[in-house]
Amino acid sequence: MIDKAHLIYFSPTRTTQQIVEQIAVGLGVQQIEQHDLTLAENGIDLQVDDGIAIIGVPVYAGRVPEVCLTRMQSLASSGAPAVLVALYGNREFEDALVELNDVVYAKGFLVAAAGAFIGEHSYSTPEQPIAAGRPDAMDLDRAKAFGQAIAAKLHAGGPLTAPTIPGNIPYKDRVPLGGVAPETDKDLCTLCGTCAKVCPTLVVEVDEEVVTAAESCVMCCACVKECPEQARTMNHPRVQERRALLIQNCSRRKEPETFLE
């Protein structure tokens, strides 16, 4: 019987974290250890040999973000079961889940299950919503039920059967990030520093004004969503064009997909 879960996740806007935590609730484990990669600039040094790992990442343009891979470099196991989670903004998860599977398998885990869930898109705004408010109550219920199904599989005993996970190998080409970042409205900004505190790549500095190193921004928009004064916005023409395409083509609600054999 597995009584411990290691929650390992990168979640700038806390959507991935919510799904990972609900899967753990469904598993019914007695102990939960949180390993948050979001602000861990130097990554985590973690050997998982007991319990189960639930590893969650957001999907950036159909791939696992490079910052996630970097921060998981010192993650390893000697055969612990793992549940994989890819969270995407209602477009497509494409090759992210199969890429995460390859990475985690190479680190010594045995993948027991995987799921693709939906979260509010980074580019979503109140005026132009894209999967706004997700994961919602139905998504969280699905995540909990997924955890319960995984627990039943593990309690049944027998060898772990790796699930068949959709995706392409080789993976799609990685879309370069950087060069675009949210801007600050000086009339609204109070220099509170929230934007700098939540930035996963530490590219925001607050002194007499807010300065963002756009070349290293991953466009997660955590600073936009967390700003208490709504002083941060992401309105670069490239983003506005992408946002309009997403609203046009990806407004129909998608549901979580889970893979368990």
Image: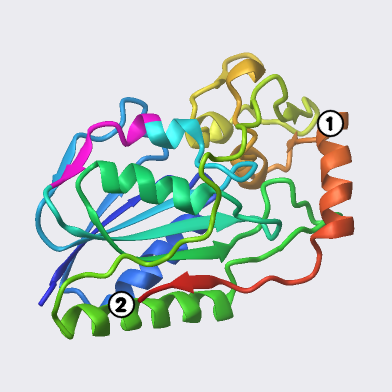
Q: Position of residue 239 (x, y in %)?
A: 81, 36
Depth check: give the residue in front, 94 or 122. 94
Q: Position of residue 90 (x, y in %)?
A: 69, 60
In the rendered image, is residue 212 in sight?
A: no
The magenta segment: 70-77
Marks 1 and 2, how far apart at CA: 41 Å
Q: Which residue is mark 1?
A: 238
Quarter where residue 162 is shown: bottom left
**Residue type indicated by callout 2:** Ile
Write the residue at 62% across / 33% down.
Answer: 173
Write the residue at 48% across / 31% down.
Answer: 66
In the shown orientation, is residue 195 left or right of residue 97? right
Q: Which residue is mark 2?
A: 150
Q: Position of residue 34 (x, y in %)?
A: 27, 53
Residue 194 lies in the magenta stretch: no
Dividing the image into 4 quarters, which one contains the C terminus?
A: bottom left
Quarter where residue 255 is shown: bottom right
Quarter where residue 5 is shown: bottom left
Residue 74 lies in the magenta stretch: yes
